[in-house]
Amino acid sequence: MSTAQYERMTGEPVGRLTLSLAVPAVIGMMITTIYNMVDTWFVAKLGTQAVAACGVTLSIQELTMSVGYWFGMGGGTAIGLLLGARRTEEAGRIGSTAFFTTLMLGTLCALLGNACIGPLMRFLGASATILPYAVAYGRFILLCFPVMAGSLVLSTILRCEGKMKLSMLGIASGGVLNMLLDPLFIFGLRLGVTGAALATFLSQLAGLALLLFFFLSGRSETKLSPRLFTPRAGVYRRILVTGLPSLTRHGVTTVANIAMNTAAGLYGGDVLIASLSIVGKIMALLMAVIKGIFQGSTTIFSYNKGAGRTDRVRAAYRFALSFTTGITLVYAAVLTFTAEGVLSLFGAADPLIVSLGARALLIQVYALVLMPFNFSGNSLLQSVGEAWKSTFLAALPQGVFYVPAVFLLPLWLGQDGVLLAPALGQVLTAVVSAPVIRGYWRRMKEEPGQASYTNSQLNA
């Protein structure tokens, strides 16, 4: 790896470095989230069932991200540690194995999913009225599986190298193209909900092509080549165990979406499913910022952990957590006064969707302040190689706590129980996460590499 990049990652003041890495990541995440919101806005013009179909097929997209981030974060985190230790050849084997395995696994999932598309959509929560829209939309979303998952692997590797701008360009290009193709395919070519899915597929394909160009043209530190593909147990163990928190985080989100659609169908029908789908898009806007900032930070965590600079790991964590908490408080304050106005943008002129969605948004907004802290713990632990603890924390908010809550709370509170479940999951996760994170920092005090810089130098 280049000496200049190594010195930047291990020597530049942490605050400035975090922002320089985080801004491109935030932009990429925001564009992806905004194109999802724009997609929902266009689909909303087709009716309540079409919007609900997007919510149902969201589980497939989450599963795709589960696989992509499993191999991407598993390979990328290992690559960050290896580059920090200047072991570049081994980094190339890890990256190539992660990428080509993801393409094969994604293709298999796409073929199997399309072979049983009807039963799959019903399993994901589609009612009889939603099913035709979900099948039409889901076919192309399944075709996106290997493309989107492969893109996530490559963009994550670039991010873990510190090449945040290239990572952003690869992901954001697909989002921008999607926003341009949506109105053309949905209304211009009169393809309806199928047009929205086709636009997503073609846009993701373009994004993957651009990311491949970055690797094949030598713009990455990690070499990507079929001859570096190393399907050995030791390589897979390193990738899969390190990436397990990401698989868990997105995997439990898939389960949570299925649970939410099922519970919403029981207590509110298509309107509640559509409302919660839109609320999820609005909440994703904040999560895009939080994830983007911690994506920039995890690069610093892994590099400096590999280089023995644990003082910089601590400083980067504190900076990122403080920064994201401040942004979250502002976002919560704005949504408190604008919930119905924001929902009306996606409500397809249905006042019930606006009303239910506004209630759900206001309930969740007061638990927003806990999101940065909950996300920071598993993000930090994963990037420094504490995979099992990170996996445990990743499973809490939407798996261990949310799924039982979304079925149990409605027994006493009815429809409000479905709306309250996400907020309860965040609160309980914070309670459990605090001692785990505190224990890690206690252990880190005993590690070498402390106090090489002063606090003012680290956070400048």
Image (cartoon, helix red, strand yellow):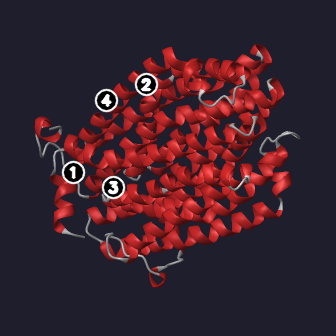
Q: Is residue 335 above or below residue 92?
A: above
Dots 4, 2 in contact, CB < 8 A: no
The residue that label 1 is drawn on is 309
In the rendered image, the quadrant that contains the N terminus is: bottom left
Left or right relative to 110: residue 118: right
Q: CA distance from mark 2 to mark 3?
A: 25 Å
Q: Is residue 397 visible?
A: yes
Toward the right, the furthest residue is 128
Q: Is residue 409 visible?
A: no
Q: Identify the secondary structure beneath mark 3.
A: helix
Dots 3, 4 in contact, CB < 8 A: no
In front of the other: label 1 or label 2? 2
The amino acid marked with disc number 4 is: Ser
The residue that label 3 is drawn on is 164
Left or right relative to 370: residue 183: right
Residue 322 got which mark? 4
In the rendered image, the quadrant that contains the C terminus is: top left
Q: Is residue 158 above or below residue 369?
A: below
- In this view, the residue in front, 99 or 85, is 99
